[in-house]
Image: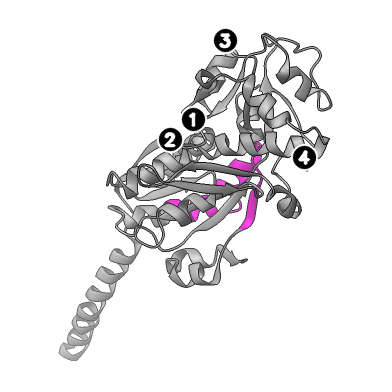
């Protein structure tokens, strides 16, 4: 009898460390999770946040939206703490955060440029994919875009206008566009233009297709040579070049046209690394964040992708959800 009791006690003592280890491994993330992201991701990320917090009720997601370049600079230049950065242009992460502040970059969604308007817009009953260039040049038509120095949608808007000159073979068209668009019509981020459209203070604004769909705006679709939404057209898009301000005052960076690709990373010194990994796992899940993006008019990459070097640096918990695509 004593031998049996001793065996049971020994077994229980051996099981305690295993139970403790198991409890540690399965502990759910908690605390505040800070996410900086592009303004164009505000609507889908709000839905993703809601679902994620239902899954992990001990996590409080704190999102801050703005122009992708501005948000990245808040981390790299201002020193604001963040766990995750999601950009409307994956290149912003490469140029502003890697390698000093982040180690990898996952491309997770695409988009395309459209020209948005409402029933209040001048010539709303006339504009279409064939005559939009003429409409934007008409006297009294108020149109705008976001700041190319702060927001990828801004420099992509200018790229569309440059490509239009090339595609339609009209020399001087790009400069003519800018001459009919005063500087006051350039706003810090593209989502700010929505309220101007809806209030009737602006007739047309350049936005991403997903933003137009999410906010119920009317929009003009563009030829694939212009909309920056077709990966196979990147060699053509590369003829468009926009100069934007660099990290230091007085310096500049040249942005070269390419198909629209969103990127996301975890900051190396993320205050809540565990919650960040859990959020990214949900974002990358086909039936999770990727489905939400698709349902809201923003085509996701399924699976999401990174480089071979990026894959080697990803958290182990994310590698099964990501593929290598240089």
Q: Foreground mark, 2 or 4?
A: 4
Q: CA distance from mark 3 to mark 1?
A: 16 Å
Circle 3 is placed at which residue position? 201
- Which residue position holds label 4? 166
Q: For label 2, count other residues whose C-alpha is less than 10 Å away and answer few (under 14), some (14-19) or many (20+).
A: many
What count of labels does the image hold? 4
Mark 1 or 4, nearer chain start: 4
Please name the residue shown 57% across and 10% down the image.
Answer: 201
- Badges 2 and 1: C-beta atoms under 8 Å apart? yes
To which residue does mark 2 refer?
A: 65
Q: Is residue 65 left or right of residue 74?
A: right
Front in this rendered view, residue 122 or 46? 122
Residues packed near mark 4 inside 10 Å, few (<14), some (14 to 19) or many (20 plus): some
116 on left or right of 8: right
Alpha carbon distance from label 1 to label 4 = 27 Å
Residues at circles 3 and 2 in contact by the CB criterion of under 8 Å: no
User: Residue 261: image x %, image y %?
Assistant: 60, 49
**Which residue is found at the position 66% from the left and 49% from the top?**
259
Q: Magenta region: which residues?
A: 279-303
| Spatial separation of the CA atoms under disc 3 and disc 2 | 23 Å
Badge 2 marks a residue whose secondary structure is strand
Please name which of the two marks, 3 or 2, marks the residue nearer to the observer.
3
Q: For this rendering, which residue is in front, 270 or 113?
A: 113
In magenta stretch: residue 137: no
x, y (%) of residue 295? 65, 38
Q: Quadrant of the N terminus?
A: bottom left
Alpha carbon distance from label 4 to label 3: 30 Å
Q: Quadrant of the C terminus?
A: bottom right
The nearer-to-camera label among 1 and 4 is 4
């Amino acid at each position: 009898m004593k031998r049996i009791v001793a065996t049971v006690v020994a077994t229980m003592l051996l099981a305690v460390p295993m139970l403790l280890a198991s409890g540690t491994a399965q502990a759910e993330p908690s605390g505040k999770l800070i996410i900086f992201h592009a303004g164009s991701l505000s609507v889908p990320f709000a839905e993703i946040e809601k679902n994620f917090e239902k899954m992990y009720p001990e996590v409080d997601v704190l999102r801050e939206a703005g122009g992708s370049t501005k948000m990245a600079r808040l981390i790299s230049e201002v020193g604001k703490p963040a766990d995750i950065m999601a950009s409307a242009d994956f290149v912003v992460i490469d140029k502003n955060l890697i390698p000093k502040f982040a180690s990898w970059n996952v491309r997770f969604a695409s988009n395309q440029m459209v020209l948005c308007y409402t029933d209040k817009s001048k010539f709303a009953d006339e504009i279409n994919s064939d005559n939009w260039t003429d409409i934007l040049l008409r006297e009294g038509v108020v149109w705008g875009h976001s700041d190319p120095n702060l927001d990828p949608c801004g420099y992509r808007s200018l790229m569309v206008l440059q490509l239009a000159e090339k595609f339609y073979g009209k020399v001087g068209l790009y400069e003519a566009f800018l001459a009919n668009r005063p500087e006051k019509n350039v706003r810090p981020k593209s989502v700010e233009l929505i309220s101007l459209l809806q209030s009737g203070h602006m007739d047309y604004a350049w936005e991403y297709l997903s933003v137009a769909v999410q906010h119920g705006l009317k929009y003009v679709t563009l030829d694939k040579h212009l909309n920056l939404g077709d990966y196979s057209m990147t060699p053509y898009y590369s003829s468009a070049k926009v100069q934007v301000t660099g990290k230091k005052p007085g310096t500049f960076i040249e942005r070269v046209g390419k198909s629209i690709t969103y990127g996301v990373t975890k900051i190396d010194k993320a205050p809540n690394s565990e919650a960040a990994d859990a959020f990214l796992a949900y974002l990358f899940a086909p039936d999770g964040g990727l489905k939400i993006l698709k349902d809201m008019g923003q085509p996701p990459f399924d699976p999401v992708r990174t480089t071979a070097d990026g894959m080697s640096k990803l958290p182990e918990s994310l590698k099964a959800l990501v593929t290598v695509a240089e």
